[in-house]
Amino acid sequence: MRFAISIFFLLFVSTFVKAQYTVHKMINVGYVYQNQSFGEVGGKLMFLKNDDVIYRLGASALMGSANSDFAIMPKLQADVLLNFEKNVDFYHSYYFLAGFETTNKYLAPKIGVTLFGILDLTGGYAFPISDSKLNGKELKGLNVNFTLNIPTAFLHDMLK
């Protein structure tokens, strides 16, 4: 319950952040390996003031098979994208990424790289939350994510 209250507080505070930061919405699809293979579909909000530091918050659903049974898990994530190269636009094509993701089964800090903030490759280590298992399968250890983030403004312009 405390976790849900924290998320709602973060979303409430983010409405005030809008005054200083530009907010972009994105749809994300991807692949997650966490002792099982999962497909990921969801949405993210990207907050930026300048190109050096970008913040992202997201929520998505992980879908896959665990012990031969189909399973869906909710996932929340927060990322910080960093690139401090100055006065060179081409070097802002890549960012270093640090963040964390959590589901109802595990919490995983992660690091990685992103190309234009659109294509992410991250890795980390998942720590199980209490004794929770997914269809009898424990989800801990190496965590790998490959994600495509599609800005909704881009989709809107394409479909005009």
Image: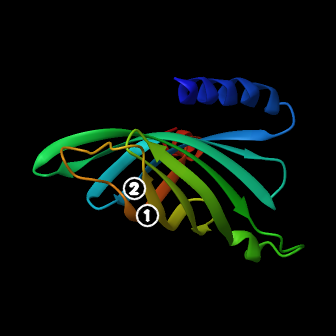
Seen at 83% across and 74% down, the residue is 85
Which percent across, then down, holds residue 66?
19, 51
What coloring was used for the rendering? rainbow
**Residue position marked by numbered label 2 in the rendering:** 30
Which percent across, then down, holds residue 42?
44, 41
Label 2, secondary structure: give it: strand
Is residue 17 shown above or below 131? above
Q: Are marks 1 and 2 in contact (CB under 8 Å)?
A: yes
Front-most of residues 14 and 159:
14
Q: Is residue 65 left or right of residue 82?
A: left
**Residue position marked by numbered label 1 in the rendering:** 146
The residues bearing labels 1 and 2 have C-alpha atoms spaced at a distance of: 6 Å
Front-most of residues 23 and 6:
6
Image quadrant where residue 15 sits: top right
Image quadrant where residue 82 sits: bottom right
* Label 1 neighbour load within 10 Å: few <14, some 14-19, many 20+: some
Q: Is residue 32 left or right of residue 157?
A: left
Q: Is residue 54 left or right of residue 136?
A: right
Seen at 89% across and 73% down, the residue is 87
**What kind of residue is marked 2?**
Gly
Sequence-wise, the earlier of marks 1 and 2 is 2
Label 1, secondary structure: give it: strand
Seen at 47% across and 57% down, the residue is 148
Image quadrant where residue 46 sits: top right
**What kind of residue is marked 1?**
Phe
